[in-house]
Image (cartoon, grey):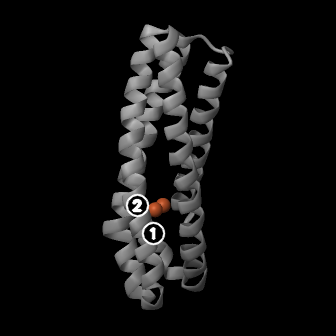
């Protein structure tokens, strides 16, 4: 029943991993900057905006309902909520580094090297925080869904 929600998490994991991998390929010169840019730009925008939307839905819709259903988990949901704020800040710095990176792609040379390294560091930070958060969230919510089958409707 919570398939859709889990699928979103898997999509974030997969796309986040693919984007990181693509930056490594660019750095190792396995892909040319122009085709990289064409592939990378829409996907990074998609990931950042989808993540922001996903967290908003969780904060305003899913988490409050889960907390009513299981008040003992309040502390857990508070932690997930705080994670969303941390990840939001990471998304903002990731978007900034991403824009600088795309500019660097057009310039090439040292500008590209510097911007791609900076972006790579930002992306790693975001990905590490995100992976941990997705796992913690599933650890808290999946047992609740299994326990109370009806809660699955909250996620639809
Ligand atoms: Fe979340
Ligand atoms: Fe989530």
Contact between labelled residues 1 and 2, with CB atoms less than 8 Å apart: yes
Q: Position of residue 68 (x, y in %)?
A: 37, 86
Question: Which residue is under mark 2?
Answer: 84
Which residue is most to the left? 60
Residue 101, x across and y down, in percent: 44, 23
Q: Is residue 27 above or below residue 136?
A: above
Task: Please state the horizontal and vertical placement of residue 156, each as a whole percent of the image.
Answer: 44, 65
- Residue at 59% of width from left, 27% of height from top? 23
Q: Residue at x 69, y 15 (%)?
A: 30
Residue 95: numbered disc: none
In percent of the image, x 58 and y 60: which residue is there? Answer: 132
Secondary structure beneath label 1: helix
Q: Is mark 2 within 8 Å of ligand 1?
A: yes
- Judged from this view, the residue extending furthest toward the bottom is 72
Residue of label 1: 80
- Where, quadrant-wise, is the N terminus in this rendering? bottom right
Who is closer to the viewer here, 154 or 52?
Answer: 52
Label 2 SS: helix
Q: Is residue 15 left or right of residue 155?
A: right
Q: Is residue 77 above or below residue 87?
A: below
The answer, for residue 1, to whether it is visible in the render is no
In this view, the residue in front, 29 or 148, is 29
Whether 93 is drawn above or below 62: the answer is above
Q: Residues within 10 Å of mark 2 (few under 14, many from 20)?
A: many
In the image, taking residue 57 as reference, residue 130 lies left or right, namely right
User: Does 64 appear above or below 85?
Assistant: below
- Res. 28 image quadrant: top right
Residue at mark 2 to residue at mark 1: CA–CA distance:
6 Å
Question: Residue 42, position in %: x, y?
Answer: 44, 28
Which residue: 55% across, 76% down? 140
Quarter of the view holding residue 6: bottom right
Ligand 1 neighbours mark 1 (CB distance < 8 Å): yes
């Amino acid at each position: 029943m919570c398939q859709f929600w889990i699928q979103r998490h898997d999509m974030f994991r997969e796309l986040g991993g693919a984007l990181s991998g693509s930056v490594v390929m660019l750095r190792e010169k396995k892909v040319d900057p122009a085709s990289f840019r064409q592939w990378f730009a829409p996907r990074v925008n998609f990931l950042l905006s989808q993540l922001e939307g996903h967290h908003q839905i969780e904060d305003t819709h899913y988490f409050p309902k889960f907390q009513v259903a299981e008040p003992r988990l309040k502390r857990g949901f508070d932690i997930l909520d705080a994670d969303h704020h941390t990840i939001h800040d990471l998304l903002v710095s990731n978007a900034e580094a991403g824009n600088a990176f795309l500019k660097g792609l057009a310039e090439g040379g040292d500008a590209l090297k510097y911007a791609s390294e900076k972006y790579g560091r930002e992306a790693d930070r975001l990905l590490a925080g995100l992976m941990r958060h997705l796992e913690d969230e599933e650890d808290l919510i999946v047992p609740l869904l299994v326990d109370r089958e009806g809660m699955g409707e909250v996620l639809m």
